Amino acid sequence: MVLKSSEVENQTVITEFILLGLSNDPHIEDFLLFFFMIIFLVTILGNVIVILVIKSELHLQTPMFFFLSHLAFVDICYSSVTVPRMLANFVTKQKTISQEGCIAQIFFIFQTACTEVFILSAMGYDRYVAICAPLHYSRYLSKEICNKMVGGAWLLGFFHAIVNVLPLLNLHFCSKNIIRHYSCELPSLLALSCKQNLINYIVLLISVFIFGLSSFLFTLVSYIYIISTILKIHSAEGRRKAFSTCSSHLIVVGLFYITGFFRYMKPNSESFIDLDKVISIQYSILTPMLNPIIYSLKNKEIKSALVKLFGKYNPISNP
């Protein structure tokens, strides 16, 4: 495998990186190609179906499902940032990626991941208003406010991405060029820099705390009020129904936050590389696939809409 490089002031400057991926065994790679291709197709299909069902059913035109449809769209984008490139590497066996391509991938990972956490926060706020202030639901979550919340999520995602990517333009890579991962993620790239990168780590730490922790605390505070309100409900059936409307959201939030914070906040160490890959697969590949499944199984409205949709196009039930 030939790496492109250029001589600058008698120093070799790396302009391409090698993504080692998940395995070097051709037989294992063939299996991984099939496995992750199925996951990617399920992810795209599942999230597209959720979007179509919500758009086609009038009774699903509520803030909760509005946010869910945007979460499904973000999951499609998020999964598409890394999986197609990984699949292409399996097929072509050409595991190189340019420095510009690597930085672009980091940008879109930050953009879509940050957008997702703020949409999850908006969904937590939706549950808070629905349970704690139901009489003001239409006022606090009007169509205009919902649009602004989604637009704000994308804007905050852009800011989070840009503040982490711009400092990368000043880094130089002159010796190490092997990324022991299947995609370009910021911690993996910073470990290869031959220039002092303390500023990059400081920016990463501050931005994760500002964007990640703020959205998490917003969701946490929402659920403190939600749980407090639910516990005051005298009927056991009423408490069960209230908890059931929040359970799918809590599962998705837990999957995403726990793995994401662990990946970006833990020390960068060779001994954690395999664990890093597993964690990254969870939040960047499996979570976008699981989200529509979790919401479909836990939400009666989505399940009934899916039955109605597939029943409409079922040739057996519609001779």
Image (cartoon, grey):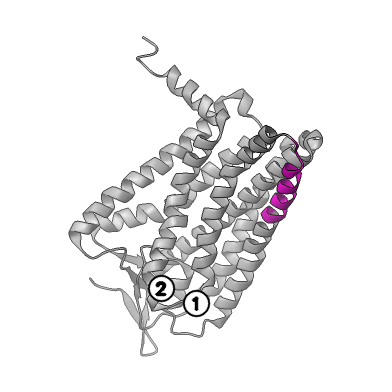
Quarter of the image for residue 126 reads top right
Counting from the top left corner in percent of width and height, residue 22 is at 31, 63
Quadrant in the picture for the N terminus:
bottom left
Magenta-highlighted stretch: main secondary structure?
helix
**Does residue 19 sit above or below 46 in this rendering?**
below
Q: Name the residue: 55% across, 77% down.
A: 201
For mark 1, does the 10 Å Cα neighbourhood hold few (<14), some (14 to 19), or many (20 or more) residues?
few
- Range drawn in magenta: 219-234
> Sequence-wise, which precedes: disc 2 or disc 1?
1
Q: Which mark is residue 137?
A: none
Q: At numbered mark 2, what does the secondary structure look like: helix, strand or loop?
A: helix
The reply to whether dot 2 and dot 1 touch (C-beta < 8 Å) is yes
Image quadrant for the C terminus?
top left
| Residue identifier under label 1 | 267
Q: Nearer the viewer, residue 12 or 58?
A: 58
| Residue picked out by circle 2 | 272
- Asked which secondary structure carries label 1, the reply is loop
**In the figure, is residue 23 to the left or right of 307?**
left
